[in-house]
Every structure is written in structure tokens, then in C-alpha cells.
Amino acid sequence: MPLYVVTDDRHVGETIAVLGKWLYRYRSELAPFTTAMLLTATAVVLHPHHSGSWPVAIAAAMILAALIAGGKRWLDRTIERVYGAAVTAAGGVWLAAGIAHGPTAPPLPGLLLLGTLAGGAPWWWHRRRRARVRIERTIQAWPDLADTIGLTGSRVMSAVVDLWGWRARLALKRGQTVTDVIGKLPAIESALSVRPGSVRVEPDPARADHCLIHILEKDPHARPIPWPPPTGETVADPVDLGVFEDATPVRVTLLHRHALVAGIAGSGKSGILNVILAALTACPDVVLWGIDLKGGMELQPWASCLDRIATNPREAGQLLADAVAVLDTRATEMTRRGSRLWTPSPQEPALIIVVDEYAELADDSPDATNHADSIARRGRAVAVTLLAATQRPTQAAMGKGAVRSQMDIRVCLRVRERRDTDLILGQGAHSAGWHAHTLNAPGKFLVSAPGHDVPRRARAYLLTDERVRAIARAHHGRRPQLDALSSDAIDHTTEEEEVIDAELIDTDPEQALWTGLLEAPDDGLSVSQLMKITGMGRTWIYSRLQQHADANRVRQVSRGRWRAATRP
Ligand SMILES: Nc1ncnc2c1ncn2[C@@H]1O[C@H](COP(=O)(O)OP(=O)(O)OP(=O)(O)O)[C@@H](O)[C@H]1O
């Protein structure tokens, strides 16, 4: 606020009042000069008649400095306590000299000026002080700002400075709700003169006429967040996806739940799938199947940890049909056992089907979407669930509708249009403050899931490609197999597999595998065929193929088809 001193003011009182207000407004910035003036005034008063009292000034200053240095209750940061103690001690020494020799005796005036500037610099620079001052001014100005914004009658009840900016509790006028505040977000940002997209509003769970606003002066998610190794040991443990802006972790439990990850191209869907797969592949009680209609590009790094992978519409249809068969068998078994929920264990693992680009599945394989619908509706209790990622979660793309509405966990990355938020998170999400179109970097997301029902921004952990490969290598030997009941429910027999030469079957699986690879046709053998020849599971086959491939003994002729590198 500029200071106007009107020189032809006939009422001197008015000028003094304006000056007084200005001094009061800038009292924090002027504090170093105020302190210097107080020291000078004290020296002026005491020097003429009490010049021998200087030791008292030194002693008082040292006691005060010691109290500040040890006063963790008032000043929590060491650097602040050191500054307070140093300034107090230096001021005390100057005051003692001023009392003894007079404040104008050289070099005291020069020292005072230098000390004020040197001691003032950290004070003027201090971020928390500046933020506190800004908040005080905002609180004072709030009634006017509220009028401008259209929230007349609201008031700031309390405010605190935090690491990233400041947060305040707002009391609303009767009849106003948090939705009114969310609707005014751009106006609030303009009124507070802050960066667009830097104000967050959250409802107060205890009061409909209160809300919390958070002003982020710095973006806590400006940099990618490295992935911390997961702590979960079973699929029942929550998976950490990333961190919220207040640094708390985003945790979701996938067991008995379907999950949808949606956002535009490049928003970070594969990144989130990687974080989830890195956690799930470490759990010995979940079998993972994958559908990747981008030719296996996205799920390829995890292939050795996936019990099964489908890369074309036909395989995808078969995979989902088999998952429905598993689901039905488990449902019957649970009725027999009299239980309501399939509790996964390494012997009876959960089955999670990861679908990358669900919309492609709906386009290319309408039959497959019928099976997906069935899994979405009935799969939870028997622990056969979907984890689907998509760019386009439209009604048409999400099949008959059951899939999207059955998704209990919805991770919404950046979307292009506001209405896409409603498509992903449900009708009315945008007006309730879920503003996914404002997410401004890959990996930033909003999550709606049990326990996460307010719009809080988060950023996913970032896993590099190298890290993904290392995790897949570390986990692939520990992957479980489906239980006998579930695998019996799957009809493995396909036309392709029937043409296998019976002579290839050998009693030693290692030998059988090698013979099969040596005698494989030019277009190689599929993993399912190798499973049939050896009688071993998919994980075993992948681990042996990996060993052979590392030693350059085998080569992948096309996606999922192998033969020996050199023929006899
Ligand atoms: N959590 C994250 N933190 C920082 N950067 C990220 C994060 N997630 C993704 N990215 C960056 O964004 C880029 C695109 O991410 P990703 O491939 O996951 O997007 P996508 O939504 O799967 O895209 P598409 O739909 O084209 O496959 C990546 O190259 C990566 O560098």
C-alpha cells in the first residue's frame, strides 16, 4: 500500500494518523530500526547519570541471549535461536558501551548502523517472517477481499505458515458451503495475487459452514519423487502410489477391489501401473495376468512376473473367459465351504488382471468386454479383480457400463476437459472440486477410493525403466501359481497346442524344454506350448527362457514365441 502524505493538509492529525497506520502496517519490516532506536534512547537516558550501570546491561543481555538459545518451545529451528541469541548479545554489548561512553561517542553510531543492517538482513530475508506478515495482512484485508470474490460474510478464523505456503480455516456465512468456495477458486487466486492453481480448498469434516484453504507458494510436487521399495508383503497390504501435497503417502488396498487408472496420453498411466506392479510382484499371494493390446509394449518389462499375458484381441478374449471360469469355480467352492470371501494365500492366491488401454479391448474384442463386465460385477468376493488403465473411460469405451461403475479405486491423472473428470470419477466430481484438468505434470493425480473421498492432489512415485527391469528380475522367481482348483477350471487346450508332437514330451522338464526349443518350427513355440511339453508352470518357463536368453542359447522369434538360437 503506497504512503500518501498530503502536504497541504490542514488537519495535522490526519497526516499523523496516516503515518501511524503506515508504521503499524510495516512494523515487522521496521523492527531492526525500531530496536536500534530503542537501544539509542536507553543509552541517551542512562548515560548522563548512570554510566556505571553498564555491567547490568551486559548481564541482562547475556541472560536473555542464553534463554533464547535454549528456548526450543518458542523457536523450533536452531538457526533461528542462534540468530536471536547473537543479535541480543551484540545489542547488549552496544548498549553497555553506549551507557558507559554515550551513544554518540565514536565509533558507536557507525557500529549501530552497521549492526542494524547486518542483523536486519536475515530478518528481512526470513521466509517464515515474510509469510506470517503476508497472512496477517490477508486476514486484515479478508472482509474486502471476500466482498470482491463473492464470499461476503466469510471470515478467516486461524492461519498457519507451513513448509510450502500457508493454510487457513475459513468460517462461511450461513447458507454458504464449501462448493461455493470451490466455485470461486480462480477469483480467490486473483484476489490473493497468487499463482493460478496454487489454492486448494477442502471441506471441514466437522462443520458444513467451515472449510480449509491451502495456499501453496511453492509446488511440493515440482520434482519427480523417487520410488521407495514397498513395505507390503501380501496383496492384502496397501500399496503406496505416491505422496499427497502434505507429504502423507497415498495408500490403496487392491484386494477385493477393482481399480481404474485414467488420463490423457503421457499423463503417467504406465507410471502408476509400474508402481502397482512393483508392489504386487513382491507379494507371493497374488497371480498376475496381463492384457496389453499395444503389442505388449507396456507390460513387456513385467512379462517374466506375469503368469499370463495377452497381446491380441483373441488372446485377451480367451484370458478373460478363463478368468470368468476361475471366478465361477471359486464361487462354487466358497458356497461349498460356507465362506463369503476368498482369503488369498500363496497356496490359493488372488488373481489380478492388468489391462493396459481398456478402450482398445472394448473396440477390438466386444466379446471380451462381456467377460470383463462379468468379472467387474462378480469378481470381488472371489479375489478375481481388474486393474484397468485407459485414455478414454467413456461409456462406449468401458463396455456395457458395469466396468466403470464397479471400479472402487479410481486414479484420475490429467484430463483434457472438465467433463472427463466426471467420466472417470463420477457425475458431479468436477463441481465438488475434483479438478483433474488443472494437474500440470505427468504422474500428478487425484484418487477416489475407500478412505480417500476428498480431492487432494498427489504425485506418483517415479520408477525408471532400469529399476522396473531390476524389480522384475528380482521378483520373477518368487511368483506363485494358481491353485489347482482354479487352474483345472481353465481349459488350456487350444487348436494350436494340439499340434504338438507327442515325441517331444520328456520326463525331465529341463531336457524337454531344450528338445522342444531345438525342434521348434521356424516361427517358434508359444509359452503355453512349452508349458504343455514340460508339464511346468508359466513362471518356471519364463525363468528358464530368461537363463537361456542371457546365455544367447534361445531367441524370441516373435512376441511370446521362442526357439533355440542355433539348430542341430
Ligand atoms: N510419477 C511421475 N513423476 C515424474 N514423471 C513421470 C511420472 N510418471 C510419468 N512420468 C513421465 O511422463 C512420461 C509419460 O508417462 P507414461 O508413459 O506413464 O504416460 P502414459 O499415460 O502411460 O502415456 P500413454 O498413454 O501414451 O502410454 C514418462 O516418460 C515419464 O518420464
Image: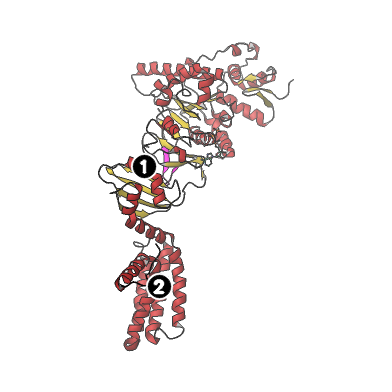
Q: Which residue is painted at 43% across and 31% down in the image?
A: 424
Residue 505 percent coordinates (x, y): 62, 15
Q: Main secondary structure of the magenta part?
A: strand
Residue 209 visible within the image: yes
- Between disc 2 and disc 1, the foreground one is 1
- Which one is nearer the viewer's eye here, 287 or 88? 88
Q: Is residue 201 above or below residue 137?
A: above
The quarter in which the N terminus is drawn is bottom left
Q: How many marks are shown on the rendered structure? A: 2
Please report whichever mark, 2 or 1, sits nearer to the chain's N-terminal start.
2
Q: Is residue 156 left or right of residue 263?
A: left
- Name the residue tied to disc 1: 182
Give, as a three-letter code, the residue at label 2: Phe
Residue 455 percent coordinates (x, y): 39, 39
Query: Element at badge 2?
Result: helix
* Quadrant in the picture for residue 53: bottom left
Q: Which residues are magenta?
A: 241-251
Q: Any mark on residue 339, and which?
A: none
Query: Element at badge 1?
Result: helix
- Name the residue tied to disc 2: 33
Q: Is residue 476 left or right of residue 332?
A: right
- Which one is nearer the viewer's eye here, 241 or 29? 29
